[in-house]
Image (cartoon, rainbow, N blue to C red):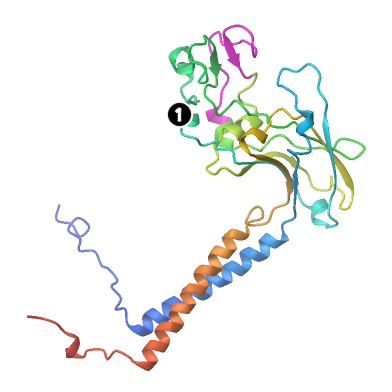
Amino acid sequence: MDTAFKQQRLRAWQPILTPKWVISSFFAVGVAFIGIAIGILGASNQVQELSLQYDAKCENHFMSWNASSYSECILNFTLPSNDKWATSEVYVYYELSNFYQNHRQAPFLQLNPFDSDAFGFADKFQDPQDASKELYMYPCGLVNGPCHLLQPLITSRRPCPTNPSGIAWKSDVDKKYIAPIKDASGLPNQGSFFCWHNVSDEDFIVWMRVAALPRFKKLYRKIPANKLKPGATYSLIIQNRFPVKDFGGTKTFVLSTTSWIGGKNNFLGIAYIVVGIICVALAIIFLVKHLISPRILGDPRYLNWK
């Protein structure tokens, strides 16, 4: 027990915070943060992003989930004339606003995918919207309901190739989401079970990772490099199954390239530059104060004792 670690006798650096040391530290941290901010903002500005809000335009094309016939909503858009759209891999997102996916009731009623034996316990998986119904859901809860918000198809005379794999976290795909066991093989609205055909579907897995804020976007597809043509006109074909007007939400289709910081993120750069400016300002204030009325080190007049 008598060790340097347990008896807190390890060597420690205890710098004396003199005015020169404090001023130098604030100035160094401020310059470093401003430099990082410039790099982040520069990388963010290189990211190409195109957003298309379509909820109002597709409002008259709503179709229920079980509709046998439907009308498609078609949005035409022109890709900006920037070579990055052709040379970079393009990420396709769908974005929702004013949608509280992290509402306290939603994750609470969600099935723990690791508990594969729990499907046999009926009480946990009754329909959360009507507990009296003898209908059991897999996965259970409110989160999985509006999974497939849109079924977009990007075309320019012919369908644009997209990659549906690799959009979900590898840990979720490999370990977290598995198909139901026992006799849970019912199709939607048939029998006593309400099951997704394939809970290992990456679109479903991406949706089930709950967003923290009411405005969020989720990865839908990846478009390989050299598949899009800058300046070309494309059509977005949407099957509108999820209305958002009732709760004041919006739906947006987003195309984006990436950089070393990920997607477009000006907030991070602005946050760094604000902290850097504050540190430099404090360094200047302390420097002026030190030059005008310095504190004499070792002056016994500052000592206070009884």
The correct choice, above or below, for 95 with respect to 27 in the image is above
Residue that mark 1 sits on: 108
**231 in magenta:** no
What residue range appears in magenta? 174-196
Image coordinates of residue 166 in percent, x first then y, are: 66, 37
Q: Residue furthest right?
A: 157
Image coordinates of residue 301 in percent, x first then y, are: 17, 90
Task: State how many labels appear.
Answer: 1
Q: Quadrant of residue 272?
A: bottom right
Identify the residue shown where x is 64% and y is 21%. Answer: 198
In the depicted view, which residue is nearer to us: 259 or 264?
264
Image coordinates of residue 180 in percent, x first then y, are: 55, 17
The C terminus: image quadrant: bottom left
Q: Residue furthest bottom?
A: 292
The amino acid beneath tag 1 is: Phe
Considering the numbered disc 1 on the image, is that residue within a helix, a strand or a loop?
A: helix
In the depicted view, which residue is nearer to us: 245 or 226?
245
Characterize the magenta stretch by its predominant secondary structure: loop
Q: Residue furthest left?
A: 306
The correct choice, above or below, for 222 with respect to 180 in the image is below
Identify the residue shown where x is 60% and y is 24%. Answer: 199
For this view, does 289 lie left or right of residue 94? left
In the depicted view, which residue is nearer to us: 105 or 275?
105
Question: Local crowd at mark 1 within 10 Å, few (<14), some, or many (≥20)?
Answer: few
For this view, does 77 lie left or right of residue 98? right
Image coordinates of residue 157 in percent, x first then y, are: 92, 37
**185 in magenta:** yes
Identify the residue shown where x is 52% and y is 11%. Answer: 133
The correct choice, above or below, for 106 with respect to 92 in the image is above
Identify the residue shown where x is 56% and y is 26%. Answer: 177
In the depicted view, which residue is nearer to us: 226 or 286?
286
Q: Quadrant of residue 22?
A: bottom left
